[in-house]
Structures are given as structure tokens and as C-alpha cells.
Image: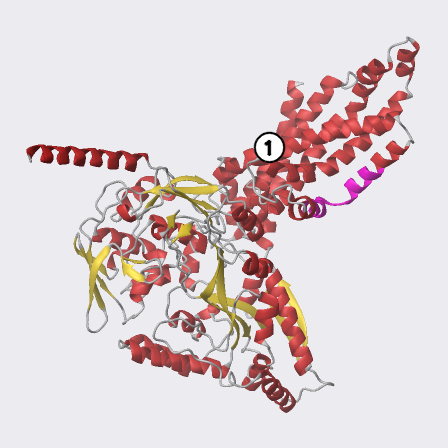
């Protein structure tokens, strides 16, 4: 188990290096630079800025310089928010993003499995079709459509909830729901499918034949088995929630990392974009590893040697 | 008699006691301001945006400072003398000028701050604001060491500044954040992190106490500020709210006392339902279309540029589209500069019908007709308001002149690059003056300004007139020369003025002392809260 984890972590280093390299050259391909503004700068001021930020060096040289910095854990100063280093900005936004993403994940797992299980038990009933139909819509409609719609209906027209900002539970409600909806849908569909399969399996028939109460059969035997695919989906779900939160944070004006990512790209804030990409990369790799290890603990058929 | 005196003394003592306890026990007065965006930096030498300038205006004070109406008042300098040739300014600093950490603020602090500002190592975007000072530009260019800046501390209270040429708006420029004094003691100790709460030392009415990026900035009253007795608001919060719709909701919920702006589409509602708290006044900015005069068909045909400008019904644009009290523009410099006569294009006096007829004639003369329409590409940066105006303009050109317009919208940074490289035919742009003087606008169209010139306009006569105005020390004669330069621009029409900006804020009726002004400056120290 431990050696497996170490192997996986070592394997992550080249992955991160590839991500870092591609991002580095991609952000610089975009037209315009971090210091372009309404006022065009006199040439000598432009030169001074470039010199201070090493933007006057050839790209490969800048790339190597950046690699050296990152190796020492220094992501450099932000080009836009000049009084802060990228590391400081990420740590100031992370608690907010974690709260948003974590709550959305929790909501998705609880509601998704419950809905999926219900649908499986009432297979082909009206309820089943309703849940699955809604789930299909949840998967098909992107959250940058859902979020403004929710805001429009609940925030603007009905005035029930605040339309932006962060801090109170009312402000959390809309963004969390918008972020969780597609995941609820996925998890509901997965739970239903694996549950239906399990309900037809031999050991459930045995349990019923032994005369176990239906409630125990469903909760202790069927549902536990049905949750395994859900656990293995948590890795991709994290990645989806992270990319989703980039959009959601921008729409609701939430001071998390996702917003920095969008703002950083628009401002050509090279260091900030790079820092966020690397941070997200590490986060997703770590979470996938945790999910795989947890899977090994849950499913007796899996062994990591 | 003695008893009476005793009684009076006691009563006086009691009164004094009551006064001191009530003063120390009075409730904290807190002002909450919507402030647009997260500051790039609070370092006056580094920042470029309006939101940070509002905060800096509260925590720093320059030699001169804007009053509640935005006009110039003595700040750290209690008086100054200007030599007859307009080249030497001698400032007398107030004897009680002091930093928030108790260190005396001296003339040497200004010399330090300004040479840091123009130092190439600082890489300040706004270094050029101080370029009128002798050697400042050469320092930025790396030609002379920063010690040679034309500012010297004669003694702790006397600052002598020499200029490379008379600059009548120099004092106005000193209100700009780049001329604020910065604390050498904190900068040398903390480096790039000197602006953080706990590190920062400042000299204005307020001191930074908290800074949560994208959350809020909290500033508290500076007890050592020279005018602290007159400062009534104890604590200010600045919130970086970029969505004006969100900001308005927070204002209506009572979570903000003042807003940075208002959503354009809500203006009619605000005028109707919240008139008492909705503030709308002229702003020192011009919304215009730049014509690329380095390319045909516009390069050699000035009349054609006029035709495009004439066909625009500006009244419709401001009444039907922007709806924010903007003023239709027929000149380049916005109204409101004291002593400057507003200039207009020569056809400003004719009505829209006559203008359209004239424009049609010009197009026919140039050989454009139904079979061979004039084709124009219009560039704007991605934004709803710009888009609406561009569509309306394209419609007017089509309807009145048969011009076929292609719209091209680009994301902000891409648009800036296209603009600087002159890869456009006609483009949308705007200019907000940095200081209240026509030159803040006229400088933009000099042939030697480089990429900043929005149209690629280069007219040696214009540049010569601008230079003459720069050397002129008599204010009235100088304004005459600048007006002459503006008339040249309006005759050549490298830019099509569309409207003069207005500024909108929500200001709670609890806030007193808010005065609308051209530069939109509202230092917190002059505000009151009831």
C-alpha cells in the first residue's frame, strides 16, 4: 500500500511538468501582455517593467528561470496584484474554494445516491422516469446556463436569495446548488445502474431467502455494494467540480481560486495562472490517489502490491 | 462669591469630565464604500487604477490635496512660491507634518519618493507624471542616476523643485497618487510587502488595518493626522465589488453607504425611485471613435472622416442607449475646465438633417454609391455598452449614408494590441483626464507620443502649437494656444467625439458632505455620517 502510494506520487512529477510546460507557453501565446492598459506606456517605461519581471529575456530562458523558482516552491509575484505573491493569493482563496467545492461534493453524494437508490427500487415507475429525466437535463445543461437562470429566478425576480458575494449561508446556497447539480445527476444515474444490477445478484437473493428484513437487505448489502462505483467516480467528480467552480466563482463573484484563474487569464497575469494550474494539478492528482486507496479498503477484490 | 467660583469650577470640571467620557465612549462611526475592483497595489508608485487611487487618497496626503469639491487645497505644504519664469517651485512644509508611526515627515521624504517613482528599477507605469521635473525623464530612461532629480531638500521644511519647462498644471499633477510621499522606513524594511497591514506607514487621514484580497480593505482614523479633529468617520471599509448589479443590491440592502458605479440599465429606475440617493454628474472623460489615418480611404480624405462623424445622431445615442446623462460631444476636451473655452466642430451648430445631407454629398463626391458602398470595419472591446453603441452607429451609417459596417469585437488585451499596432479602420476608445487641464487630452494626439496616439495622427503644425503652449507661462495665453490646437484636431477629425462621460453613484442619505466634481474625488475625511 505505502510503496504503491509513493510510486504513484513519483509518477505525478512528470505529469505536472508536462502541464506546467504546456501552460507556460500557452498563456504567452495569447495576444497582449500583463502591462497593457488604456494608457500605452512610453517605450522606456515598458522596457523597465519588462526588465524587472524578466520578460525581456528569451522565452526558453524565462521558462528555465521559472522552473528553477518552482522547484524551490516560489511561484513569483502576481503581475496584477503586485503587493502579493502568487502563493499568498492562492492560500487566501483556497479556504473559500474548498468550502464551495466541498459542500457541493457532499451534497452531490448524499442527494445523488439517495435519488439513485429510490429510482432503482421503483424501477420503471413514474418516479424512476422523473428522476432519470431530470438527471439527464442536469447532465446536459452546462452550469454557466444553470447558474444565471437560478440567479434570475430566485435572486432577481423572487428576491429570495442574494445574487452574489460570499460570507453568509444564503450567499452559499445558489453557487453550491449550481455546482452540485450536474454531479447529483451523474451520481444518481450511476447509483441506480449498479443498484439494479446488485438487486438481481445471488447474494441479495440469498439474503432475502434467509428472511432478512427488506430494509436491512437494501441498506447493508445492496447499497454498500452499489456505492463502490460512486467512490471511484469521486476522482473525476473532483476535477469536474474544480473546473465548474472556475465558472461559478466568476458568475457569483466569489473570492476563491477559480476567480483568480479567470481574472489571471484575462489580465495576462502569467504567474498567477501558472500557480493556479499547478495547484489544481496537484490537488486532482492527490485526490485521485486518495480515492484509489479508499477503494482498496472498501472492495476486498482490489489489492495494491 | 467664593462659593460661587468654587461651584463654577466644580461644574466646569464636571462638564469637562462629561465631555471627555462622552468623546471616548461615542459609538464608532463606520463608512462602507463600494470600490469597484481589487487593488493591484496600494503602493502609489506602482498602482494605476481608479479603485486604488480612492484608497490612497484617504491614507496618503500629497503636498497639495483635493478638497471635498475636488479643487486644489494645501496638503503637506502650507504654502509655495513659483518663480517668474515658472521653472522653480519652493514648497514650505507644515511644521506638524508627521508619519503615522510618529516619524517627522520632511522635504527629504519627497525627494526620496519622487526619485523612487522615476527610478527604472521601480518600473512604475505612471513615472511620466513626474517627467516635467528636471532630469526625471532621463532617470527613467537610465541616462542619469536618480540622485540628479530636480528636487532638493533645502532643509527639513523646504522643498525646492525645478522643472524642465513651465508646466502650469504642475500643481494639479501633484494631486496625482504618483506624487504622494512614501515611507522610506517601511519600504527599506519590508520591501515589496510594505503596503501590508502592520507594515504600512502612511501620512493621510486613515491607516490600513486589514486587507483580505477580494474581500475587503479596512482603514481606521490616523490619530496623528494633522487635521484629525476634523475627521468624523472612524473606520472605512472598501469592498471590491466588480458587478454593479450586485453592488446596487447591497446598497439597497443597507450594506453599503456609497457605490462605485451603478448598472447602466437601471438608471431610469434609479432616477424615478431613488432620486434622493442617486448622484449623476459630468465626468472628465470622452467616449470617441478613433479613425486609423495611416491607411486609405481615410488617410487622404479628411472630408470622409467628417462624413462619418456627421452621420451620427448623438442625441439618440445618449438618450436611447447609454441613458446615463451623458453629454453629446462635438469637441475633444470635456467641459468644466475653469477658464478654458470649449471648442466644437464647425458643423455643431447645424441640425441633424443638414449634417446628413452634407455627409451624403461628401460620400458621393468621393465616388461611393449604392453600387460601390463605403465599407468600414469597426473594432470594439468586448462589453455590452460598446456593443450596443457600435450596432447603433453601424445602423446610422447604413441608413443615412449606405455605409456597410463590419463589427469586430475583441477581448480587452487583444483589442489593446490591435489598437497599438494600428490594425483597425475605426475603433471605439475613451479617455479620462489624469488632471484637470486640456493638455491631458491634447497630449494624446501628438505625433511623437507613439502607440498611445489612437489614430496614428501626426500633424507637425499641431505639435508645434502644443509645444508653444507648453512653454507659455501666461495661463490665458496658454489656454488660447491649446484651444487653437484643439481646433486643428477637430478640423482634421482623426477622432470622432461621441459623448462626454457622466459618473454615477448611489450615496446614502445618511452620508453628508458628498460633492459631485469633475474628477470624481471624494476623500472620506470630508464626509459625515448621520
**Residue A264 image offset from top left, x and y in percent:** 55, 48
Query: Residue sitting at 55 percent across and 33 percent down?
Result: A95
| Front in this rendered view, residue B397 or B276 | B276
- Disc tally is 1
Q: Which residues are magenta?
A: A133-150
**Residue B403 image offset from top left, x and y in percent:** 67, 79
Is B264 located above or below residue B34 in the figure? below
| Front in this rendered view, residue A37 or A192 | A192
Q: Determine if residue B425 is in view.
A: no
| Front in this rendered view, residue B518 or A267 | B518
User: Which of the 4 image quadrants contains residue B498?
Assistant: bottom right
- In the rendered view of the protein, which quadrant contains the N terminus of chain B? top left
Query: Residue sitting at 39 percent across and 80 percent down?
Result: B483
Image position of A230 (left or right of B109): right
- Which residue position is annotated with label 1? A99
Query: Residue sitting at 71 percent across and 85 percent down?
Result: B372
- The secondary structure that dominates the magenta segment is helix
- Residue A52: in magenta span: no
User: Which of the 4 image quadrants contains residue B6?
Assistant: top left
Image position of B69 (left or right of B76): right
Chain identity of mark 1:
A
Is B164 located above or below residue A247 in the figure? below
**Residue A5 image offset from top left, x and y in percent:** 65, 23
Amino acid at each position: 500500500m505505502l510503496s504503491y502510494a509513493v510510486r504513484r506520487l513519483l509518477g505525478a512529477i512528470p505529469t505536472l511538468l508536462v502541464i506546467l510546460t504546456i501552460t507556460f507557453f500557452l498563456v504567452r501565446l495569447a495576444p497582449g501582455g500583463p502591462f497593457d492598459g488604456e494608457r500605452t506606456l512610453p517605450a522606456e517605461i515598458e522596457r523597465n517593467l519588462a526588465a524587472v519581471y524578466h520578460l525581456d529575456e528569451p522565452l526558453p530562458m524565462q521558462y528555465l528561470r521559472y522552473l528553477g523558482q518552482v522547484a524551490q516552491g516560489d511561484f513569483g509575484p502576481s503581475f496584477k496584484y503586485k503587493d502579493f505573491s502568487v502563493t499568498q493569493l492562492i492560500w487566501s482563496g483556497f479556504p473559500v474554494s474548498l468550502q464551495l467545492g466541498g459542500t457541493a461534493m457532499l451534497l452531490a453524494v448524499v442527494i445523488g445516491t439517495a435519488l439513485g437508490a429510490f429510482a432503482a427500487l421503483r424501477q420503471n415507475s413514474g418516479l424512476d422516469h422523473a428522476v432519470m429525466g431530470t438527471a439527464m437535463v442536469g447532465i446536459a445543461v452546462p452550469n454557466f446556463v444553470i447558474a444565471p437562470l437560478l440567479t434570475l429566478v430566485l435572486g432577481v425576480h423572487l428576491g429570495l436569495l442574494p445574487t452574489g458575494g460570499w460570507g453568509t449561508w444564503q450567499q452559499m446556497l445558489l453557487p453550491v446548488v449550481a455546482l452540485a447539480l450536474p454531479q447529483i445527476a451523474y451520481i444518481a444515474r450511476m447509483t441506480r445502474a449498479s443498484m439494479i444490477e446488485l438487486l438481481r445478484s445471488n447474494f441479495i437473493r440469498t439474503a432475502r431467502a434467509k428472511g432478512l428484513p427488506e430494509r436491512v437487505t437494501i441498506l447493508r448489502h445492496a447499497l454498500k455494494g452499489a456505492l463502490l462505483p460512486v467512490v471511484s467516480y469521486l476522482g473525476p467528480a473532483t476535477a469536474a467540480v474544480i473546473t465548474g467552480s472556475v465558472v461559478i466563482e466568476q458568475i457569483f463573484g466569489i473570492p476563491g481560486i477559480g476567480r483568480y484563474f479567470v481574472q489571471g487569464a484575462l489580465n495576462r497575469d502569467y504567474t498567477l495562472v501558472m500557480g493556479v494550474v499547478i495547484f489544481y494539478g496537484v490537488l486532482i492528482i492527490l485526490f485521485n490517489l486518495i480515492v484509489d486507496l479508499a477503494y482498496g479498503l472498501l472492495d476486498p477484490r482490489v489489492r495494491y502490491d | 462669591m467664593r462659593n460661587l467660583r468654587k461651584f463654577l469650577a466644580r461644574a466646569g470640571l464636571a462638564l469637562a469630565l462629561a465631555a471627555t467620557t462622552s468623546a471616548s465612549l461615542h459609538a464608532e462611526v463606520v463608512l462602507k464604500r463600494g470600490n469597484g475592483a481589487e487593488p493591484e497595489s496600494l503602493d502609489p508608485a506602482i498602482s494605476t487604477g481608479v479603485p486604488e487611487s480612492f484608497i490612497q487618497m484617504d491614507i496618503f496626503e500629497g503636498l497639495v490635496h483635493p478638497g471635498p469639491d475636488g479643487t486644489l487645497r494645501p496638503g503637506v505644504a502650507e504654502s509655495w512660491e513659483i518663480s517668474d519664469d515658472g521653472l522653480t517651485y519652493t514648497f514650505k512644509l507644515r511644521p506638524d507634518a508627521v508619519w503615522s508611526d510618529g516619524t517627522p515627515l520632511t522635504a527629504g521624504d519627497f525627494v526620496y519618493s519622487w526619485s523612487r517613482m522615476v527610478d527604472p528599477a521601480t518600473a512604475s507605469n505612471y513615472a511620466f507624471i513626474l517627467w516635467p521635473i528636471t532630469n526625471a525623464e532621463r532617470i527613467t530612461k537610465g541616462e542619469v542616476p536618480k540622485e540628479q532629480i530636480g528636487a532638493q531638500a533645502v532643509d527639513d521644511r523646504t522643498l525646492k523643485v525645478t522643472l524642465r519647462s513651465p508646466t502650469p498644471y504642475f500643481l494639479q499633477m501633484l494631486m496625482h497618487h504618483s506624487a504622494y510621499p512614501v515611507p522610506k522606513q517601511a519600504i527599506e524594511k519590508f520591501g515589496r510587502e510594505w503596503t501590508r497591514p502592520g507594515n504600512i506607514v502612511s501620512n493621510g487621514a486613515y491607516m490600513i488595518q486589514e486587507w483580505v484580497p477580494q474581500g475587503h480593505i479596512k482603514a481606521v482614523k490616523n490619530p496623528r493626522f494633522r487635521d484629525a479633529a476634523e475627521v468624523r468617520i472612524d473606520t472605512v471599509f472598501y469592498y471590491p465589488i466588480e458587478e454593479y448589479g450586485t453592488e446596487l443590491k447591497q446598497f439597497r440592502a443597507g450594506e453599503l453607504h456609497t457605490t462605485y458605479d451603478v448598472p447602466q440599465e437601471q438608471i431610469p429606475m434609479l432616477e424615478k425611485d431613488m432620486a434622493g440617493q442617486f448622484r449623476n454628474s459630468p465626468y472628465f472623460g470622452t467616449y470617441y471613435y478613433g479613425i486609423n489615418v495611416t491607411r486609405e480611404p481615410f488617410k487622404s480624405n479628411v472630408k470622409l472622416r467628417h462624413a462619418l462623424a456627421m452621420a451620427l445622431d448623438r442625441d439618440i445615442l445618449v438618450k436611447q442607449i447609454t441613458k446615463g446623462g451623458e453629454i453629446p460631444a462635438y469637441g475633444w476636451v470635456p467641459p468644466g475646465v475653469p477658464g478654458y473655452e470649449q471648442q466644437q466642430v464647425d458643423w455643431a451648430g447645424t441640425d441633424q438633417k443638414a449634417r446628413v445631407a452634407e455627409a451624403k454629398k461628401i460620400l458621393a463626391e468621393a465616388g461611393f454609391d449604392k453600387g460601390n458602398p463605403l465599407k468600414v470595419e469597426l473594432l470594439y472591446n468586448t462589453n455590452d455598452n460598446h456593443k450596443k453603441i457600435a450596432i447603433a452607429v453601424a445602423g446610422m451609417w447604413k441608413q443615412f449614408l449606405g455605409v456597410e459596417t463590419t463589427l469586430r469585437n475583441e477581448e480587452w488585451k487583444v483589442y489593446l494590441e490591435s489598437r497599438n499596432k494600428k490594425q483597425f479602420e475605426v475603433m471605439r476608445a475613451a479617455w479620462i483626464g489624469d488632471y484637470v487641464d486640456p493638455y491631458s487630452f491634447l497630449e494624446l494626439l501628438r505625433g511623437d507620443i507613439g502607440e498611445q496616439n489612437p489614430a496614428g495622427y501626426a500633424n507637425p503644425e499641431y505639435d508645434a502649437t502644443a509645444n508653444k503652449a507648453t512653454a507659455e507661462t501666461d495661463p490665458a495665453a496658454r489656454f488660447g494656444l491649446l484651444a487653437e490646437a484643439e481646433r486643428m484636431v477637430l478640423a482634421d477629425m482623426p477622432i470622432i467625439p461621441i459623448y462626454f462621460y457622466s459618473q454615477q453613484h448611489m450615496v446614502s442619505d445618511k452620508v453628508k458632505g458628498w460633492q459631485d466634481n469633475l474628477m470624481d474625488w471624494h476623500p472620506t475625511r470630508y464626509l459625515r455620517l448621520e
